[in-house]
Each structure stands twice: as structure tokens, then as C-alpha cells.
Amino acid sequence: MNLAPDFPDDHTMHLLMQLLHEELGLPERKTIGLTTSINFDLGCDGADARHLMEALEEQFGIDFVDYDAYRYFQPEGYDVSLKRRAKGRGDKVPLTIGMLYQAVKVQRWDTQPLEGL
């Protein structure tokens, strides 16, 4: 795995990357940075996304205050007809490693500040 030059090198990031590797299987040839999105760049979605977020909550004690999985991930068994019914939930937002890292550091998921990174 190639890490971007400005990638944090601390214990918290090492634990997060270990978890991401176990849950998602990080690519060997792609450069990983804080702006790498787990949903778009790494293809995490559906049940994999749910398992990952549960593991983050369990391992790091993150309080998911206003986390909305539908902002980032397609639901398992995604049906196009459901998209029309889920107003405001059609276009997905990138969920980056930097967002996860910050949430782990403060042990809290606050969508607006995290998406502003």
C-alpha cells in the first residue's frame, strides 16, 4: 500500500488503517491519502459499509450523533425505485479516510464539521 506524503503517522491512524485493511482490503497499488473516499475510491457500500461503521463504533467508541448512512452509501439490495422516494438522498457524498480519522480522534461523528475538512 502506498501512502500519500502528508499521511499522518500516529498510533490512531495505524489502528484505523488496520481496521480498514481488515474490513475492506486496501489496494496495494493505489496511493491512499486523507482525501481517499471509502465509498467511491475503495468501493465500500451496502453490508460492507454497515459492518465497517459498526466496527468503528465498537473499536473506537465513536458516538455517531448525526451519522446518516444514506448520505454516503447505497443500501443493501439497492432498488432504483427507492431512490425516487428517498428525497435528498440520491447523490452520495464522499466519506474520506480523513473524516474517519477525525471522528476517531474526537470519538464523535458530527457531519457538518467532518464534511468541511
Image: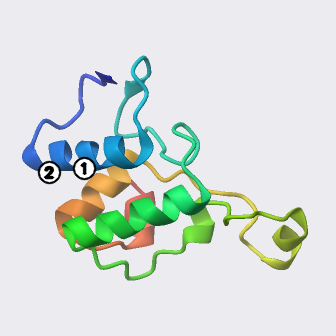
Residue at the image position 60 percent from the left and 66 percent from the top: 71
* Distance between the alpha carbons at the discs numbered 2 and 1: 6 Å
Return the mark for residue 61: none
Please state the horizontal and vertical placement of residue 90, each as a whole percent of the image: 76, 64
Q: Which residue is mark 1?
A: 16
In the image, farthest residue toward the left: 11
Q: Is residue 73 left or right of residue 6?
A: right
Percent x, y of residue 26: 40, 34
Do callouts 2 and 1 mark residues in contact (Cβ within 8 Å)?
Answer: yes
Depicted 32 relative to depicted 63: above or below: above
- Horizontal and vertical percent position of residue 12: 14, 51
Picture quadrant of residue 89: bottom right
View extreme (top): residue:
29
On the image, numbered disc 2 is attached to which residue? 12
Task: Answer few, some or many: residues within 10 Å of disc 2's Cα (few below 14, many 20 plus, some between 14 and 19).
Answer: some
Tag 2: amino acid:
Thr
Circle count? 2
Q: Is residue 105 left or right of residue 3?
A: left
Q: Quadrant of residue 31?
A: top left
The answer to whether residue 27 is above or below residue 58 is: above
Vertical order, 60 against 23 (above or below): below
Q: Is residue 84 above or below residue 49?
A: below
Can you say which quadrant of the picture contains the N terminus? top left
Colour scheme in use: rainbow
Amino acid type of disc 1?
Answer: Leu
Q: Residues within 10 Å of mark 1 (few under 14, many from 20)?
A: some
Residue in front for this viewpoint, 14 or 65: 14
**Residue shown at 22% from the left, 66% from the top:** 59
Asked which secondary structure carries label 1, the reply is helix
